[in-house]
Image (cartoon, rainbow, N blue to C red):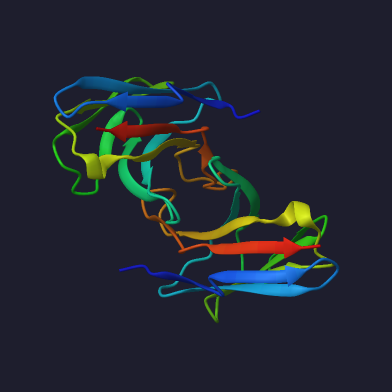
């Protein structure tokens, strides 16, 4: 069982809707990530939060808005999406600090499959 | 810019056979990861390789890292159908701040 929990697992929305994807981890990790994955492609990094601060935004359109309320939670707010935004959205976490015991390994949630009509 | 390549991209093999998947990357890094993804599912961590010469084995899979050659291999021994999946290697240059995936190798093990 994954220790990174994502909700909802499936989401269908129209182009004028506003919805949110949620992610939660209880491993004490200090870095959290949003990735987007299209079919038959590798995951592509969207955002990185390190110690609850946005540290990387990979030129993602403003219709995607991340939020990190605390070190265990990560949200992705969606507004005015396009059909081409349909994809699997993966949340991940890692220890997030340099140091002897930090392997840098990413732990992924099950993903939220988004369909934009 | 960090680039990660995998070879082959598609692999169809018979049960019981051996094969190797290769992962090349473009810039210096000593942190490389292998993940498995089943269709419609998330990514499962297989191996974490953190130094030159690192070798890890789990069941029929063995991964190694040569940082001087910027090459990692994932060797499959006596393949079974359950190994059918897509395998991604990923390279990390900065503790998650630059974590780049290869394109993936789609493995199909035939009976």
Q: Nearer the viewer, residue A104 or A101?
A: A104
Q: Residue furthest top?
A: A69
Please name whichever residue, B35 or A89, is drawn nearer the observer in this view of the structure. Answer: A89
Q: Does any portion of residue B81 appear in the rendered image?
A: yes
| Residue A3 to residue B27: above or below | above
Q: Position of residue B86 (x, y in %)?
A: 58, 56
Residue at x 29% of width, y 21% of height: A20
Tell me the quadrant of the picture where the N terminus of chain B can be found. Answer: bottom left
Q: Nearer the viewer, residue A27 or B7?
A: B7
Seen in the image, is A104 located left or right of residue A85? right
Residue in the image at 43% along x and 55% along y = A42
Q: Is residue B49 above or below residue B10?
A: above
* Count of marks overlaid on the render: 0
Q: Residue at x 36, y 30 (%)?
A: A51
Tell me: A103 left or right of A66.
right
Occupied quadrant, residue B23: bottom right
């Amino acid at each position: 069982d994954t220790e990174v929990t994502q909700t909802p697992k499936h989401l269908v929305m129209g182009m004028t809707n506003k919805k949110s994807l949620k992610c939660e981890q209880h491993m004490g990790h200090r870095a959290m990530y949003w990735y987007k994955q299209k079919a038959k492609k590798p995951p592509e990094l969207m955002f990185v939060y390190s110690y609850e601060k946005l540290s990387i935004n990979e030129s993602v359109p403003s219709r995607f808005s991340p939020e990190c309320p605390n070190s265990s939670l990560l949200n992705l707010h969606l507004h005015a999406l396009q059909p081409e935004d349909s994809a699997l959205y993966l949340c991940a976490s890692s220890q997030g600090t340099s140091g002897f015991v930090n392997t840098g390994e990413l732990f992924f949630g099950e993903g939220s499959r988004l369909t934009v009509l | 810019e960090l680039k990660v390549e995998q070879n082959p991209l598609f692999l169809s093999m018979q049960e019981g056979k051996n094969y190797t998947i290769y992962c090349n990357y473009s810039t210096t890094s000593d942190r490389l990861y292998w993940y498995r993804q089943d269709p419609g599912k998330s990514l499962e961590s297989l191996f974490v390789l953190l130094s030159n010469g690192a070798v890890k084995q789990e069941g029929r899979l063995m991964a190694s890292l040569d940082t001087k050659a910027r090459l990692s291999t994932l060797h499959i021994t006596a393949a079974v159908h359950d190994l059918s999946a897509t395998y991604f290697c990923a390279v990390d240059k900065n503790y998650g701040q630059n974590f780049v995936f290869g394109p993936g190798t789609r493995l199909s093990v035939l009976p």
